[in-house]
Amino acid sequence: MEYTSTLVENAVNELSRLPGVGKRSALRFALYLLKQPQLTTDSLCNSLNKMRSEIKYCKVCHSLSDTDICSICSSSKRNHAQICVVENIRDILAIESTNQYRGVYHVLGGIISPIDGVGISDLTINQLVDRVNSKAIEEIILALPTTMEGDTTGFYINKILQDCNVKITTIARGIAIGDNIEFADEITLGRSILNRMPFNQVHNNE
């Protein structure tokens, strides 16, 4: 595709770096923004710059936050004895949308995947163990992808927490095998949280 404007071409090239955005979609976005008031594009750019420069990771759960401790971890209305372990912040948003969970979270920052170069040391598993050992934690809920990598991560966490006197459960397999949490519909995900089962019981039956 030959562009009549290098400025538009540069904008399209940058927008097409976004996940799931091809050149045609990027061009549509760029032309749309050109038609908007200057204030609209300035607001968009300022929001992105502010997010990039000021975003923090919660010191407790490692989710993205505006402050050192996120709003969920600092809430007195949440059950802090119950920790739901997830791969990333998108999973938190998916679970929160169900309105079926009132505990807190722990974000691993990924799942064990040697083929992708992601090992145990790349995740916040040690920090999870520290939370369990230092707080009165009653239950760990493993809400990880139903993939080989997700199961491997779950098995490892289950193994290292065996001596910690904490109940370990996993969400019910209403989530299809191979699915990510963030793509599940709210009803299915909500039921999976409510109908969670002991981790060992689920995987011993497989």
Image (tube, helix red, strand yellow):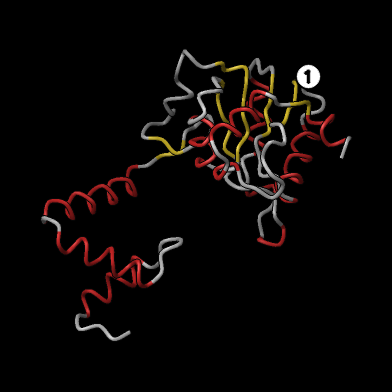
What's the residue at 81%, 35% (across, down)?
159
What's the residue at 66%, 44% (across, down)?
145
Secondary element at image label 1: loop
Q: Is 204 placed above or below 114 here?
A: above
The number of discs equals 1
Q: Name the residue under label 1.
A: 165
What's the residue at 64%, 23% (across, down)?
194
Residue 27 x, y percent position in the rendering: 29, 70
Q: Quadrant of the N terminus?
A: bottom left
Residue 186 x, y percent position in the rendering: 53, 34
Q: Is 21 placed above or below 122 here?
A: below
In the visual, does 70 lie left or right of 133? left
Q: In which quarter of the image is residue 20?
A: bottom left
Instruction: Kindly give the residue lying farthest to the bottom in the view shown.
Output: 2
Q: Nearer the viewer, residue 185 or 167?
A: 185
Q: Which of 147 and 158 is in front in this view?
A: 147
Q: Quadrant of residue 165?
A: top right
Q: In which quarter of the image is the C terminus?
A: top right
What's the residue at 66%, 61% (across, down)?
116
Q: What residue type is labelled 1?
A: Asn
Residue 3 x, y percent position in the rendering: 25, 83
In the visual, does 191 lie left or right of 56? right
Residue 101 x, y percent position in the rendering: 56, 23
In the visual, does 44 lie left or right of 203? left
Q: Nearer the viewer, residue 187 or 165?
A: 187
Q: Is 127 placed above or below 152 here?
A: above
Q: Is 122 placed above or below 105 here?
A: below
* Residue density around tag 1, few if under 14, some if 14–19, many if 20 or more, within 10 Å: few
Q: Which of 76 and 25 is in front in this view?
A: 25
